[in-house]
Amino acid sequence: MASKYERIQPRDFDKELYKAWNLIESCFAKFKQYRAIATCYDNLASHFLSAIHLVSSIVWLN
């Protein structure tokens, strides 16, 4: 199996799908900066969802 540097033809990928995936991954990375979201300390799903909403609004404003 050739390494990625020895390939003659690069692998095909969907650029739009990669952009969307990258956006979602960076969003999760920003969410993980908040301890309560990263460790899921909330017992109720409604409390966890409200924390997600709060953090997403903070991230959006910054």
Image (cartoon, rainbow, N blue to C red):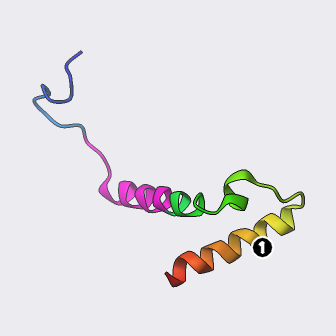
In the displayed structure, does residue 10 sit left or right of residue 33? left
Front residue of this view, candidates 49 and 59: 59
Whether the magenta-drawn stretch holds residue 20 is answered as yes
Left or right placement of residue 17 versus residue 48 in this view: left
Q: Residue at x 46, y 60 (%)?
A: 26
* Quadrant in the picture for residue 20: bottom left
Residue 9 in percent (x, y) is at: 13, 34
Number of labels in the image equals 1
Please state the extent of the stretch shown in magenta in the rendering.
12-26
Residue plotted at (61% across, 74% down): 56
In the rendered image, the residue lying farthest to the top is: 1
Which residue is disc 1 drawn over? 50
At which x and y percent is residue 32? 59, 57
Q: Position of residue 44 (x, y in %)?
A: 89, 61
Q: Amino acid at mark 1?
A: Ser
Image quadrant assignment for residue 23: bottom left
